Image (cartoon, helix red, strand yellow):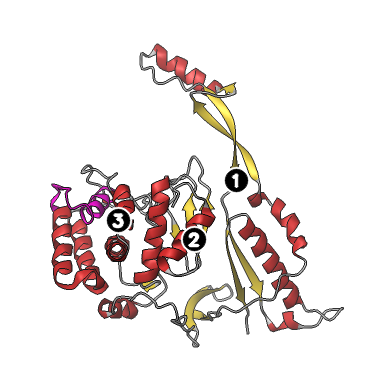
Amino acid sequence: MAEGRGAAGLALLLRALSGQVGHVQWMDETPTAPALRPVLTDTHLLLPEALHANDRLAAVAHAAAHRMFSTPHQPAAGLRPISQIVIASLEDARVEHLLAEQLPGARRWFLRGLQQHRAEGLGFADLLARMSRALWDEGWVDPNPWVHKARDSVREVVATQGWTNAAALRRVGAVLANDLGQMRVRLDLATYAEPTAYRDDNSWLWQHEATSTDAQALEAAPANPRPDSGQAAPAIPESPRIWTYPEWDHRTHHLRANWCTVLEHVVGVAACPPLQHREGATPLLRLPWARRHRQRVRRQLHGEALDLEACVRFAADRRQGSVDEPRLFQRQVRRRVSAAVLVLLDLSASTGDALPGGSSMLSLEKQAARLLAHAATVQGRRVAVHGFSSD
């Protein structure tokens, strides 16, 4: 299979590996933003455009492994962020090994991506990267005691139970995360990114609104088996989730705890009628987030114009004897604005009232939302449609 294939070819690979339909789309990166990592959702795999050819294949195989062997949307309540990340890293290794047992050819994709890590650095991301390689590369020896403990602990579990026991590895991850806390290893969530380029950001793995009771019960949950081709989709829970929020009473100057109640209903997937008047989405393609904008990039080695600020700084540095690389130019690049679209619909009973012509405000809202979602999807954007109503 050619490594240079685009999103359509990678989507076919995802389906071939996992036996499930999935869409692959590209994400734009900006020069000033941190490095993007793949994002896995229930329907899509979003890949950074700058991802290396082998890492694209590894990312698709990794996503397929998650879909086949992981339990999505696990309750994260009661787990510190450092515990979530370490446990997720062990889950990454677990599902990759399970996939490689069935499809040995995927092993080289994972190894190529992980062998980029070196036995250097004592930061959180460095240690996690070293552990990830140690769990895959049998011929690689890492001298760090924490990495050594992680490798031995996982080997002990695998030797007796194989890679299928997710709960056992979850407990190992909790211990390793606690060790990092004892070692005073700092995790900066504002700048942290998954150190392995082809692995996703684990947002698909966790459900952050769940209760701590659910998180504790998951410790004993069985591993998720590979679904059969005829297996029915999981049922949507009928009872809504209940959330309570405080509200400030401006008349009494009092904060009322748990005063507002929100009932969250999950809507099942249903077949939609054909989208009418699709040409109405054409103007939406000209929205700011759908266009490529010209952006000035400064301090370049080559370019169409001089960067005056860089020239002044270079001259000052040269007089002080600390001359650096002469990055004296600027150039224009065209970049597409990165955006995710959330459409919030008013589903109150009043929107169902009839309008002149026999339609209703609700039907117009739904059609407009579908047109906007279509336009966003065409441009490769992440889009979600939510609704609200009040008593």
Q: Position of residue 300 (x, y in %)?
A: 50, 26
Q: CA distance from mark 2 to mark 1?
A: 26 Å
Task: Read off the residue under disc 1.
Answer: 336
**Residue 76 visible in rendering:** no
Q: Pointer 2: residues within 10 angstroms few (<14), some, or many (20+)?
A: some
Residue at 20% of width from left, 66% of height from top? 172
Q: Helix, strand, or loop for circle 1?
A: strand
Q: Is residue 270 above or below residue 79?
A: below
Task: Read off the residue under disc 3.
Answer: 107
Hey, what amino acid is under mark 1? Arg
Q: Helix, strand, or loop for circle 2?
A: helix
Task: Read off the residue under disc 2.
Answer: 12
Check the image and name the residue furthest to the bottom: 239
Hey, what amino acid is under mark 3? Arg
**Residue 159 visible in rendering:** yes
Please tell me whether residue 94 belongs to the stretch shown in magenta: no
Q: Position of residue 191 (x, y in %)?
A: 38, 49
Hey, what amino acid is under mark 2? Leu
Q: Pointer 1: residues within 10 angstroms few (<14), some, or many (20+)?
A: some
Q: Which of the 4 image quarters holds residue 71?
A: bottom left
> Which of marks 3 and 1 precedes in the sequence?
3
Please state the extent of the stretch shown in magenta in the rendering. 125-145
Residue contact between numbered discs 2 and 1, judged by CB atoms under 8 Å: no
Q: Is residue 263 above or below residue 14?
A: below
Labels 2, 1: front one: 2
Q: Position of residue 290 (x, y in %)?
A: 65, 51
Labels 1, 3: front one: 3
